[in-house]
Image (cartoon, rainbow, N blue to C red):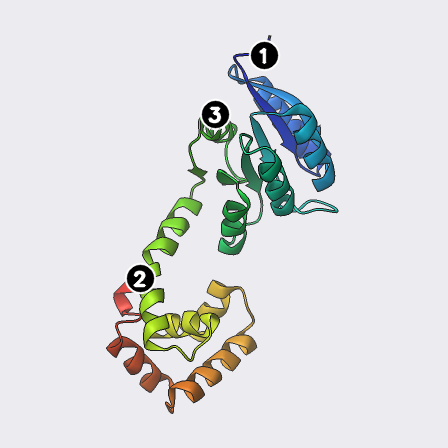
Amino acid sequence: MTDDLIRVLVVDDHPVYREGLVGVFAEAPALVVVGTAADGPDAVREAERLQPDVVLMDVNLPTLSGIEATRTIVRASPHIAVLVLTMVDDHDAVFAAMRAGARGYLLKGATPEEIVRAAVAVAAGDAVFGSGIAGRVLAYFSAERTRGASAEAFPTLTAREREVLELIASGARNQEIARELYVSPKTVRNHISNIFTKLHVADRDEAIALARDAGVGREDQR
């Protein structure tokens, strides 16, 4: 009797939260939970065995991460839509999930209604990003042009050093850069020192002027 229903596999290592999600889907007329898994290897096995339409996947799982489990599942069964539902809120995890083949990324603060809508949407082939995530994805791609300009103008800098230079030239201070890039302030200082050396500048003001002359990191970008 489930031919017309969207079949869901729920993957989360916290039993209470996992069962809560099962309850959410039990109330949704278009969806049916066909299985659950508590770790990465179990998720891969159950996805292969059950062939669900949607896998609701946490990122932080024992033994095998949700990102790696997603990659394995999608590689073996491209028709399965993986929807990430996690507490992990950083751009590295979002893009790692997308590269692994996930079709959506929600944070665990999402409402039951949002989770159900997202599951239906990814099953239909849409890409879904939760509140705050979508803006980050758009900002990332809109910044591609700037990253390209910095790579062309400053080829001696590493990719990370170009990121730091762009943030400096956009008016960010060291603490802000550290938060943005998820690194320590000491690491930021090291990157800045390397940038000064490679660009042959004496201080931050000279580095900013040089970057802005190249069209990188205008203040109105922040």
Identify the mark at residue 145; answer none if there is no mark.
2
Q: Nearer the viewer, residue 179 or 166?
A: 166
37 left or right, relative to 95 = right
Give the distance between the C-alpha atoms of the residues marked 1 and 3, in whole angstroms. 15 Å
Q: What's the residue at 55%, 76% (across, down)?
A: 187
Q: What's the residue at 50%, 36% (across, down)?
A: 110
In the image, residue 201 above or below residue 183? below
In the structure shown, which secondary structural element does the residue marked by tag 1 occupy? Answer: loop
151 left or right, relative to 29 = left
Picture coordinates of residue 183, whole percent (x, y): 55, 68
What is the crowding at mark 3: few (fewer than 14 residues within 10 Å), some, or many (at least 20)?
Answer: many
In the structure shown, which secondary structural element does the residue marked by tag 3 occupy? Answer: helix
Label 1 or label 3, whichever lies nearer to me, is 1
Picture coordinates of residue 74, whole percent (x, y): 58, 37
Instruction: Name the residue that disc number 3 marks.
Output: 120
**Would you identify the image quadrant in which residue 55 lies?**
top right
Label 3 or label 2, whichever lies nearer to me, is 2
In the structure shown, which secondary structural element does the residue marked by tag 2 occupy? Answer: helix
First of labels 1, 2 by sequence position: 1
Picture coordinates of residue 168, whole percent (x, y): 38, 74
**Would you identify the image quadrant in which residue 221 lies?**
bottom left
Picture coordinates of residue 88, whole percent (x, y): 57, 49
What is the crowding at mark 2: few (fewer than 14 residues within 10 Å), some, or many (at least 20)?
Answer: few
Give the distance between the C-alpha atoms of the residues marked 3 and 2, in whole angstroms. 34 Å
Specify whether residue 39 is in view: no
Specify whether residue 213 is in view: yes
Identify the mark at residue 2; answer none if there is no mark.
1
Q: Nearer the viewer, residue 157 or 137?
A: 157
Query: Farthest top residue?
Result: 1
- Work out which quarter of the rendered image holds the N terminus and state it: top right
